[in-house]
Image (cartoon, helix red, strand yellow):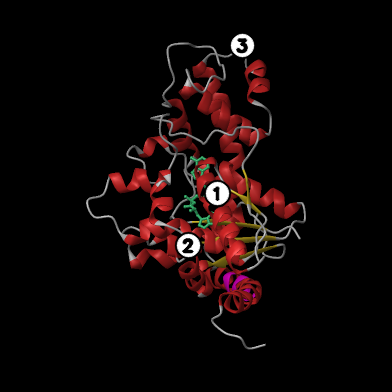
Amino acid sequence: PKRIFSGIQPTGNLHLGNYLGAIQKWTQLQDNGENVVFSIVDMHAITLTHDPKELYDNVLKMTATLLACGIDPKKSILFQQSTIPMHTQFCWVLACTTTMARLAHLPQYKEKSETLKNVPVSLYIYPILQAADILLYKATHVPVGQDQVQHIQLAQDLAVKFNNTFGDTFPLPRSLVNENASQRIKSLRDPSKKMSKSSNDPKGTLNILDTPDALMKKIKTAVTDCTSKITYEPETRPGVSNLVTIHSMLTGKSPNQICSEVEELDTGKYKLVLADLIIEKLTPIQEEFSRLIKEPAYLQEVLQDGREKAMDIASDCWYEIQHKIGYTNDV
Ligand code: TYM
């Protein structure tokens, strides 16, 4: 049977890259009646340094944000990763089946470790924990942005390895990446980098909770080039193409269709059109967020209920794993 799983780190604020790359797809799958499980991955969020005073607040903020974006706890299982101990237990089992060499190749590890003097072990095994998340729910499809595809590939490899060693257990999880723009959303200030929360220039990142004014300013000052026409050429015109990608993912129209629709506009005018579109999309989400964030008891109840449902699936799978690997032979 088909099962969708995905996760997101509890950062204080969702950015448009997260929304367009992943969350929008999550809500579509949910609304199509798929069997969906989503996790707020607080264990992944402590990989580098973090502030314990903020972590749980951020989990609740992310819960409110996801609900505001359209995740419906009646249709989706939404839970906090650290409340299901089998993720960690299974992570160890999977760690025993892979090699240092395999992990060292992963681009995200390479990039991040280069910027650190002392590399924590967690950064290295991060993708194994991610594979454990996915396989524990026997997920068949994983909706993510382009930047996570290699991690899903590792989860596939680990599933194959486990199945070959211990007997058929896991379906191979496939990543689902938005087809309209297989590009990742780039920073508005530096289109050679992905849009991210930790980017050096915060003006390059559009946050879901930014005021309309802030959104407008950031889009107006987005880096483009000396050509005023709107075209979609990610290699040679990364700045403008990034705006078209955002537009395309927001509307479901192809980049080429958008370029022909805005043929008359120069980049300055085009930015205003796009900014209006983004503000129109985000305003209702922001209103719903403001309402929900005042209801922490409700948010906790949603997570508690999600935990119970996730636990049912995870404990069945963990029971099976324990038998397959010989931790137990009880029947
Ligand atoms: P995270 O929290 O960094 O991002 C959440 C989702 O947002 C997507 N995304 C983007 N998509 C397009 N353009 C961008 N600039 C951009 N930035 C972020 C990400 O691809 C992701 O889908 N390791 C994962 C969390 C995770 C997970 C999992 C995902 C943990 N376990 C199991 C799937 C399955 C992460 O850090 O995502």
Residue carrying label 2: 129
Q: Earlier in the sequence, mark 1 or mark 3?
A: 1
The residue type indicated by label 2 comes to Leu
**Disc 2 vs disc 1: which is toward the camera?**
1
Which residue is depicted at the point 36% across and 45% down?
110
Q: Quadrant of the C terminus?
A: bottom right
Secondary structure state at the residue bearing disc 3: loop
Secondary structure state at the residue bearing disc 2: helix
The residue type indicated by label 1 comes to Gln
Residue 153: mark in rendering: 1
Residue that lies at the very extreme toward the front in this rendered image: 165
Residue 85's spot in the image, x, y percent? 50, 75
Where are the magenta residues, as a range?
303-308
Could you give the CA–CA distance between mark 2 and mark 1, rounded to whole angstroms? 13 Å
| Residue 276 visible (yes or no) | no
Residue 85 included in the magenta stretch of the image: no
The residue type indicated by label 3 comes to Glu
Secondary structure state at the residue bearing disc 1: helix
Q: Nearer the viewer, residue 93 or 185?
A: 93
Residue 267's spot in the image, x, y percent? 51, 17
Q: Nearer the viewer, residue 132 or 145?
A: 132
Residue 264: mark in rendering: 3
